Image (cartoon, helix red, strand yellow):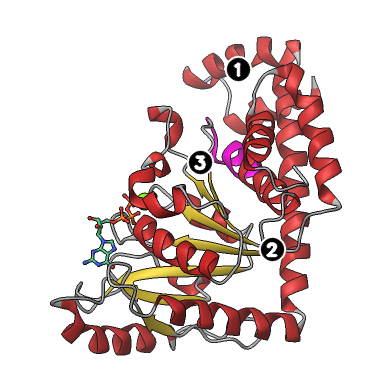
Amino acid sequence: LRGGDRSALAQAVTLIESRKPEDERSGRELIDAALAFSGASVRIGITGVPGVGKSTFIEAFGSMLTGLGRKVAVLAVDPSSSLSGGSVLGDKSRMGRLAVDPNAFIRPSPAGKSLGGVTRRTRESILLCEAAGFDTVLVETVGVGQSELAVHSMTDCFLLLMLAGAGDELQGIKRGIVEMADVVAITKVDGENVNRAKVARQQVENALWLYPPSPSGWRAKAVLCSALTGMGIEGVWSQVSEFLDHERQSGEFDRRRTSQVNAWFREALEARVLDRFYAEPHVQERLAFLEERIRIGAISPRSAVESLLTG
Ligand SMILES: Nc1nc2c(ncn2[C@@H]2O[C@H](COP(=O)(O)OP(=O)(O)OP(=O)(O)O)[C@@H](O)[C@H]2O)c(=O)[nH]1
Ligand SMILES: [Mg+2]
């Protein structure tokens, strides 16, 4: 893994994604061993409504970055992929160039029943990619509305993709997501959309001004690009780099990482405590009984909780 061998990296990710009990310990030990060699990459979250062009953008952006000599890993958080069993990012067709690039590593979202499980595995995959020498990690959000917060909680820069031709409101993107954006890229600025792009940028920037600046005093700007023609793709990188420099200088970069790793710890702790609690035989027995009592109106949910916890 430390030699940067991509098949070793793929195997390592498979190990930490495994849900076999016998892999749990070695997966954990691997992460502990990788920890000392992790942290040196820039972690960029990429979000936007379905169909906005995330995968195509990552293909262009990632290829541009490997052209600059960087090593690029592409991961995804797709909490819905447990339904289909696979992941949308499986469409490596959208990333044909990157998929065969020796300086790139593409991994679809881990499948998982809960967003928490998917999030944990992606966070660990980031560490493994870094230990394997990848200096740029792109994490795509897939699915609608759930994964953005998770991806924001594991990246240094949150990049929101928007469309040039989609009219004047914020294209159905939730307020909270626009607020989280560190950089906004208006994509598909080609063909017919070129004329609309300047207006779109103005509208997006006006909307961004409604939000307070970030704790470090950064204000997200909108840049124009097209993954199809390559126009502006380097400009997006300049904007991301400018943001990261600003964050490093203000100390916010380290603060964000620290709060992320703390949040990870708390989430992992809470997940384990819950698992343990539900695994208790007396809890399993009493749960069905109490649910039935609640159903017939014999006991309130609040009293049922009290009854379960005290006895
Ligand atoms: N004209 C133009 N079309 C684009 C551009 N980028 C992507 N597209 C097209 O937009 C469609 C969606 O692109 P994807 O990259 O799959 O979008 P996505 O956001 O990853 O989609 P989901 O993963 O399904 O959410 C495809 O038909 C692309 O060919 C662009 O810069 N210009
Ligand atoms: Mg996609």
Disc 2 and disc 3 in contact, CB within 8 angstroms: no
- In the rendered image, residue 147 lying in the magenta stretch gets the answer no
Bounds of the magenta span?
A: 113-120
> From the viewer's perspective, is 150 left or right of 190?
right
Q: Please, is residue 57 above or below residue 103 in the view?
A: below
List x then y, in percent, for residue 159: 48, 69
Ligand 2 closer than 8 Å to label 3 CB: no
Q: Toward which corner of the image does residue 302 lie, by quadrant?
A: top right
In front of the other: label 2 or label 3?
2
Residue bearing the label numbered 3: 109
Is 81 placed above or below 278 here? below
Q: Is mark 2 within 8 Å of ligand 2?
A: no
Question: Looking at the image, is mark 2 or mark 1 earlier in the sequence?
Answer: 2
Q: Quadrant of residue 277?
A: top right
| Tag 3: amino acid | Ser
Query: Which of disc 1 and disc 3 is earlier in sequence?
Result: 3
User: Which is more toward the observer, 116 or 14?
Assistant: 14
Report the amino acid beneath label 2. Answer: Ser
Residue placed at 26% from the left, 71% from the top?
Answer: 188
